[in-house]
Image (cartoon, rainbow, N blue to C red):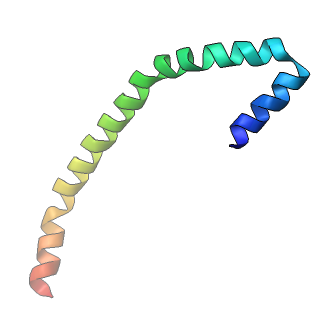
Amino acid sequence: MIAFLLWCILFVFCWPVAILALILYPIVWLLLLPFRLLGIAVGAVLDLFWAAITLPARLLKKVAA
C-alpha cells in the first residue's frame, strides 16, 4: 500500500517518470527472477549440507538425553 501511495505522489510531481517506472518495473522483476531462484537453490543446498554435518551431534544428543 505504501508503494502505491509513493507511486501516486511521484505521478503527481513527475508523471513521465512514474509512467516509465510503471513500465520498467515488470521488466526488471523478470530480469532479476533467475537470481532469486539461484539464491533459493543455493540456500537449500547449504541447509542440506548443514543438516548432514550436524546430524551426528543431534543423534548423540537424543541418545544421551
Q: Residue at x 35, y 29 (%)?
A: 38
Residue 53 position in % (x across, y down) = 19, 56
Above or below for 46 versus 50: above
Q: Residue at x 83, y 16 (%)?
A: 15
The quadrant of the rendering that contains the N terminus is top right
Q: From what the image shows, is residue 19 above or below residue 1?
A: above
Query: Number of marks in the image?
Result: 0
Left or right of 25? Residue 11 is right
The C terminus sits in image quarter = bottom left
State the image coordinates of residue 46 (x, y, percent, origin top left).
Answer: 28, 44
Q: Quadrant of residue 14?
A: top right
Q: Is residue 36 left or right of residue 11?
A: left
Residue 27 higher or lower than 2, as above or below: above
Q: Residue at x 70, y 37 (%)?
A: 3
In percent of width and height, residue 24 lies at 62, 14
Q: Is residue 29 left or right of residue 49?
A: right
